[in-house]
Amino acid sequence: MNIVITKEDLEKINFCLNKMISSSLAHSVLLIDRSGQLIAHHGNTPEEIDVLSLSALTAANFGATAEIARMLGEEEFSLLFHKGKSENVYFSAIGEHVIMVTLFDDQTSLGLIRLQINKIIDELSKILSSIFKEKTNPINDPFRLS
Amino acid sequence: MPFINFSKDEIQCKIVYYGAGFCGKTTNLQYIFGQTKEETKGKMVSIDTKGDRTLFFDFLSLNLGKIRGFDIRVQLYTVPGQVHYDATRKLVLKGVDGVVFVGDSLKVQRKKNIESLINLAKNLAEKGISVRAIPLVIQYNKRDLDGTDSEILPVETLEKDLNSMLKVPSFSASALKGTGVFETLREISKLVVKDVSRKIMLLDKQSR
């Protein structure tokens, strides 16, 4: 499956991410896919953070915890939260293909971040589901009737 | 799964270095990282244990320049080679666009090479990808040990063991000294980009 993002799609995504940053006071938001590719990135991320490596590690982190979830009889954990002394990170699954990474410091609170994430996820999942809609090939479709 | 961003005119591809434990996958990436210019590479990330064994993966992002107006960015990953880390290997293979299979020239590793190649084919098949269809390059590593006390297999034997069915491009290399490392990377990048351009043209046709 190829993922193609058009300018219009990206504008819609950027609009959502901007809204997320201004309403939650997080300093940056990243949208990545489950294989570790960066889709979009917004905010004032400190220069020393390499967002591409962060994307790869996030996807791996999600994959690893999904295995823990399966061991516990869960399908997956849809959110992960890591707390540091000043920097915190919140990972949320959006559908089966995308992860949103929210980076924030002590300028805001976890409660506000969670509230805004829940609001934005619905909007984002609508946009993303149209991008990730797989074209089913009738020849390869095992459920084809004839 | 190439990631095509028409807004930034950028294509991101994922290349995975596969092979048995201690065959030199991480050494390949380390050499590439050491030899590329600052502006074309990102940071190299390694998740390994104290004994130099890769626990999860190594990761390196490189900018290969422009093709048909698109910036090509490749992300190089390695997998842990040890047999019992199969779940991790499957995770790293997610969304892969091309594979470099690193074969170990040491005679004692002969069986492990074959097992690892079969494991690659199996794990790709689980994702609906045929090992014969995906861009693939084989590298015979540790050729610098030729003529030393270590017993190594001749390239012909390795070729017969690993490439007699696949018939993909193969390279002799020494990841430690750097010979053959960039030749391998160049070839796999070429194959992946060719594959991606074919997919883009197909998409173009479909959208018309």
Image: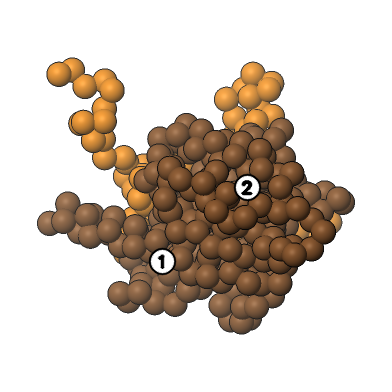
Chain appearing in brown on the rendered image: B
Residue behind mark 1: B190
**Subunit ID for the residue under disc 1:** B
- Looking at the image, can residue A55 be seen? no
Tell me residue B15's x, y (percent): 51, 56
Q: Is residue B154 left or right of residue B48?
A: left
Q: Decide if residue B105 is on the left or right side of residue B196.
A: right
Residue positioned 51% across, 46% down in the render: B160
A145 left or right, relative to B131: left
User: Which residue in the structure is indicated by mark 2?
Assistant: B19
Residue B146 placed where, x, y %? 71, 63
Q: Which chain is orange?
A: A
**Residue pushed farthest left?**
B208
Q: How many numbered callouts?
A: 2
At mark 1, the secondary structure is helix
Amino acid bearing label 2: Gly
Q: Where residue A127 sits: x, y (%)?
A: 36, 48
Q: Residues within 10 Å of mark 2 (few under 14, many from 20)?
A: many
